Amino acid sequence: MQATALFLLISCLFIVHTVIQCKKELTLSERVQQLSDAAVKKPVLRFNGDKFRQYVKGTPRNYSTIVMFTALAPSRQCGICRHAHDEFQLVANSWRYSQGFSNKLFFALVDFDEGPDVFQSLRLNSAPVFMHFPAKGKPKKVDTLDIQRVGFAAENIARWVAERTDIQIRVFRPPNYSGLLALVVLLALVVGLLYLRKNNLDFLYNKTTWALAALAFTFAMTSGQMWNHIRGPPFLQKTQSGNIAYIHGSSQGQFIVETYIVAMLNAAVVLGMILMTEAASKRDDVKKRKIYAIIGLGLVAFFFSLSLSIFRSKAHGYPYSFLLK
Amino acid sequence: MSAPVLNYRTRGWLRMSIEKQDTLLKMAVLSLAAVLSFSCRLFSVLRFESVIHEFDPYFNYRTTKFLAEEGFYSFHNWFDDRAWYPLGRIIGGTIYPGLMVTSAAIYHILNWLNITVDVRNVCVFLAPFFSSLTTLVTYHLAKELKGPGAGLVAAVMIAIVPGYISRSVAGSYDNEGIAIFCMLLTYYMWIKAVKTGTLFWSTMSALAYFYMVSSWGGYVFLINIIPLHVLTLMITGRFSHRVYVAYSTLYVIGTILSMQISFVGFQPVSTSEHMGAFGVFGLCQIHAFVDYVRSHLNKTQFDVLFRAVISTVAFGGVLILVVLTALGKIAPWTGRFYSLLDPSYAKNNIPIIASVSEHQPTAWSSFYFDLQMLTFMFPVGLYFCFSKLTDENIFIILYGVLSIYFAGVMVRLMLVLAPVMCILSGIAVSALLSTYMKQIDDVKADKKKAKFEGNYFMRSEIATLFVCIMSVFLVMYTLHCTWVTSEAYSSPSIVLSARGHDGSRIIFDDFREAYYWLRHNTPEDAKVMSWWDYGYQITAMANRTILVDNNTWNNTHISRVGQAMASTEDKAYEIMRELDVDYVLVIFGGLTGYSSDDINKFLWMVRIGGSTDKGAHIKEHDYYTAAGEFRVDKEGSPTLLNCLMYKMCYYRFGQVYTEGGKPPGYDRVRNVEIGNKDFELDVLEEAYTTEHWIVRIYKVKDLPNRGA
């Protein structure tokens, strides 16, 4: 409340505010009642400066509050805040709809543009910050979530909350409905297509389609797309000298663009092989077959040596190469 | 590959008939491949000695020894009181016994023939021996799919493919070593059964399947891929009596046999992984019945009947699904369902899966590292299979596509992918080579005919060039495989080696030194506490009772050990008294630079120790500095610098010079001077430290005399 006193001196606006606040100084039970009512409707309560002082800092309290200080206005250009907000919302929702939901714990949010005074009084100069305000006493150092180390994934926030308040929240991540929706749309399209062409389903038995699908799948897998999907590496990277690196320097990692290159190399070699086969087996134009064979041979030899040298640049100490260094 | 055979005819080579020459050549190539696959797995034996590798193989070795000495029944009823003190572990019902039974049988046969070999040597050489057998089975499998030429190429390729060698070098005595053989054997029998439709081959495939079930948990892959094959055959209208006989026999006999393994028990009829096989078995019967009815009715009658039955069944099925969901009996729309569709689900929601290195996804360089040219010969093989679809080609396509998916998700499953890579590449290489070899021959043989057949100019030159390039590829493949095997997959990890300043090799044999010290210098019933990684090795080599081991079935017990390691001496002493510990063993790499030591694993001990109720006072952030770093020097957190693990690792280390120009107590793994140098141990006394300080053993002091 010292900080509030400071502001009293600075701005007469705040005097008015404080007077109003003093007027409607509420009892504990009233405050808890109001908070609970609000929390049922909206799991994350949005506080401005006054409300923050009234509910979070007001004494006496018998409840803990987890507050996220953030800057969500688009003009602030805080991309990470948006992300953190989603995760925080997830924790709050999980708490709201959990079995143990009670009025012992509330989740709140203070936006910089709605309560800059709060930021000043807590000496916060960055966002987002997660703080725990315990039922008794002031927040200590460990009551601020160490984002640098722990991160702000919903599970980690929940674990931190459990550590601070002894309230276990099982984070329920709603399944990603966009993926499901895409699947449903795709299925509907496929079924619709089948229905439209129900008299002519031969294309399903067309083995070329299936062969192409199988080959595409193979290239996707052998070029490590699954790794990309699970690990989410950057598309490419700027090196310290300012160049752009397309190939990750070690065999432990890879960039997305790198996997495309590898898939292309593999596909080129396979295309060369297939051209060679076609050239040998077809019984038509002589010239065409010759061109096929030569192109095929070139593709196979060149792209094989290229992929070998890319691998060589990744696996340190690999001694072999072919045609290219 | 088999093309050159024809040439010898004109020279009257050894006066053999063509068939005989053909057989001789095949036998020669095959036996060379088998010998090659055995011998290129011996790098570690030649460099070090005939030892069992790593951790799990030590457990397998110990159980095999027990089986060979005590017989099957006491093995089956074995309650092991040497591990998980004071809980113990039931061994017989919690393992796949195939591996142990196989090596015990080999051991007994050899001894019966008066060839006296040690059980350990049987164990060390079992995996290479079985990979020799795998090359033979691969030959037969690829022969059934394409022809003997493809079979030979595939056999030679699988003999040296690194993806398979990684799990089957001499000394890595683990289930996978024989499981790949069993898997390919089952596939071969299955293809035979589908081709012939005889009860004999179907029963043989059921027996092979039984062997597979008895040896590896990966049998689930088999019992899903075979039904999938049958289902695909049904959808493509290739279902026949042959398939019916083959699958019905395999499913019935195979399921009954697999339930005889006590670890598998009733799973084949109760868990969801096996339901696909069961469903396809039902479909098989329905399909056969429909075919039978169709043959007895005319078309219109049949259509009416068919529609009526189908709509009733579909309606009934939906109704049952809705009712069961409403009653809460089944829940098909929960997270578990999504985890099948989205592989990153496990990473986000189950951290223990994300942390184990064997469960990592596969980067493209790992594919290239383990398979090299097979990564692009495989698609060509797929193309060949698609261009000539048969029942058995459909099987190999399914196997290939599915296993490449699994290998992409989990690097460990590269093992399942490697054989099919070899088979399909074998098909591709042999098809391409036989086409172009013929062209070289043809042009020479009948040059005059060439114009009429529409042969183009320089055809034979292009063919020659192609064959040369192909040979270069195959040579590169061989070099690559040898290099990878020798560099990456041939260290036993129980004996370490490093390069000295002058390039000479230094051997660190500290692990065995310590384990044998325990064996000879401690009481028979001493209890040794260590982190769980070393549990199997201690029981197998030191023959002492341990608290936790690599079979991490009881998390609270492991957590208790973690708490002891992470607490101060006084607290740890209480825990050690409670667990009745006599000796404590830690692995320390600060002197030699061995980086996977207990200090580097320590955060896991803290995390696991703090994960249960009793260890709630152990908080991970207490072990970090204010800046959130894990440091062992002066800046390090005081909690860390005074915990039991730190003291045991760095006891007396403060007086040791490790590197020139550095102060005493310089840790060569963390590259810092340690923070807490002068301390004495109150409740422990140093019992033994190995030559390079890698293993340090401490004796827990008895309670002090009253008044002392």
Image (spheres, grey):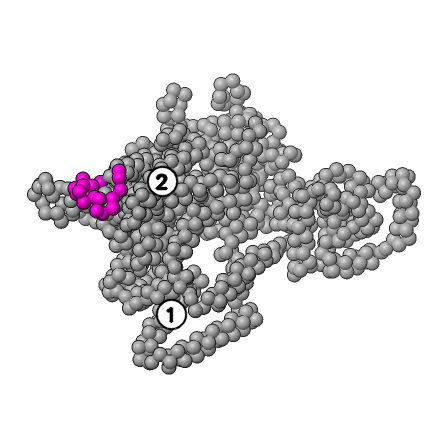
Residue A151 location, quadrant: top right
Q: Name the residue under label 2.
A: A295
Check the picture and name the quadrant holding the C terminus of chain A: top left
Q: Which of B24 and A237 is in front in this view?
A: A237
Q: Which of A265 and B166 is in front in this view?
A: A265
Could you tell me if residue B606 is visible in this image? Answer: yes
Report the amino acid beneath label 1: Gly
Report the amino acid beneath label 2: Ile
Mark in front: 1 vs 2: 2
Label 2 neighbourhood size at 10 Å, few (<14), some (14-19), many (20+)?
Answer: some
Could you tell me if residue B542 is visible in this image? Answer: no
Disc 1 to disc 2, how far (Cα)?
Answer: 51 Å
Q: Judge whether residue B445 is colored magenta.
A: yes
Q: Judge whether residue B374 is colored magenta.
A: no
Q: Residue B614: x percent and y percent?
A: 58, 48
Q: Residue B598: x percent and y percent?
A: 49, 36
Q: In this view, does B603 lie to the left or right of A142?
A: left
Residue at the spot 60% in from the left edge and 41% down from the top edge: B620
Give the structural element (helix, strand or loop) at label 1.
Answer: helix
Q: Which of A284 and B150 is in front in this view?
A: A284
Q: Residue B172: x percent and y percent?
A: 34, 42
Q: Residue A66: x percent and y percent?
A: 72, 49
Q: Mark 1 points at which residue?
A: B282
Chain part drawn in magenta: B440-458
Check the picture and name the quadrant holding the N terminus of chain A: top right
Chain at tag 1: B
Residue at the spot 74% in from the left edge and 60% down from the top edge: A41
The answer to whether tags 1 and 2 share a subunit is no
